[in-house]
Amino acid sequence: MKELVCGVCGGGSQMWYEGLYDDRYAYPGEFALYKCTRCGFAQTFPKIPKQEMTRLYTRYYPRKDFKVEYIKALAKAIPSYWVRWLKGLGSTAHYWVPQGKFRSLDVGSGSGVSLLELAKLGHEVYGLEPDRNTIRMAKELNLKVHFGFIENCPFPKNFFDYITASQVIEHTSDPVKFVLECKKFLSDTGKMIITTPNIEALHCRLTGRKWVHWHIPYHQCFLTKRTWTEVAMRTGMKVVMMRTVTPNLWTVLQFRKLLAKSKEEEWAIWRTSTDNGMVRKRNVGDKLLTGLLLIAENFWVENRLVDTLNWGESWVVTLEKQL
Ligand SMILES: [Zn+2]
């Protein structure tokens, strides 16, 4: 059996899953996941070279179709604390950042909603995004976004009070390097808030290879609690907060994935066209199901319970410099 070296702790990694594929945007090929026997860090194999990664997002991710008015409307009303709690929206890192005169960077700022919301909290905001489809939106929204990766960023050292990265670190293949690169731009009293899928989550264990967050090959790695401890140790950071949050929307998507009968039905879930991916709206049964799932998106009590036990789908980790 093939063995890989763990990219975080250096331990041995063994095949965990094979034959995984892009179930969202139909990038061709099959991929395997290798899991470290020591810290549980999981890596996608084969890895995708960085240049190919940029091409992959621009070619396969749907952001080129986003409308500026839509983004503005999304950022108009920041959801209240209780709405965020009820729907499990805390998987978005910037929701953990306080109001005030801070300077913040959102790594992987995507459509720019996070930046508009942070600006509303009084922050001086900067974004970083490798997907060139979002350049037009950043210009139209008048946002300061650097296009590229965290390495070789033009920002001054120790510049930011907050660096957030929502569902980004898993898109890199080296979380230690990612945290070290972010750290360069973080002030000595600053905080880094990172969210990422949790492979120790209850729903991951229950659904196995049908888990909706493998998102292969865009997700290049997955971290466990133990991996986070290793990452912090190797980057000179300390974990000051660590918990899980499960967005109800994720659970709805998980159910739709489980109910999809073919790859085509899985891909349709992620289409951003006017049908909003509601492929199952065909008969009364499907309509009923869609309705139930939409209600579930607001009131999925089980997720709140799962999060209380820290068995939720997304890690929320706050790191500070170990001075
Ligand atoms: Zn390891």
Image (tube, rainbow, N blue to C red):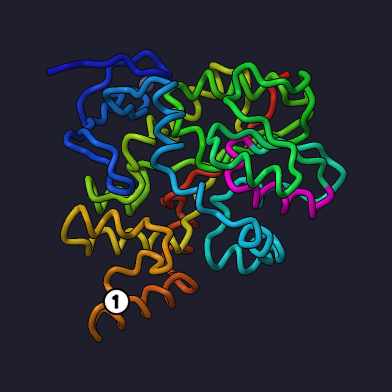
Assess disc 1: are there few (<14), some (14-19) or many (≥20) residues with their C-alpha within 10 Å of its C-alpha. Answer: some
Residue 17 appears at what percent x and percent y? 20, 35
Where disc 1 sits, the SS reads: loop
> In the image, ligand 1 is in what quadrant?
top left
Q: Nearer the viewer, residue 5 or 272?
A: 272
Residue 5 appears at what percent x and percent y? 31, 14
| The image quarter in which residue 21 lies | top left
111 in magenta: yes
User: At 46% from the left edge and 27% from the top edge, which residue is drawn?
Assistant: 172
Seen as rendered, the residue at the extreme right is: 101
Q: Is residue 197 left or right of residue 239?
A: left
Seen as rendered, the residue at the extreme bottom is: 284
Magenta region? 107-122
The type of residue carrying mark 1 is Lys
User: At 74% from the left edge and 37% from the top edge, which residue is drawn?
Assistant: 144
Do we see residue 240 in this rendering? Answer: no
Screen quadrant of the C terminus: top right
Seen as rendered, the residue at the extreme left is: 1
Do we see residue 124 in this rendering? Answer: yes
User: At 43% from the left edge and 59% from the top edge, which residue is drawn?
Assistant: 272
Q: Is residue 54 left or right of residue 35?
A: right
287 in magenta: no
Residue 142 appears at what percent x and percent y? 76, 45
Screen quadrant of the N terminus: top left
User: At 58% from the left edge and 54% from the top edge, which residue is drawn?
Assistant: 90
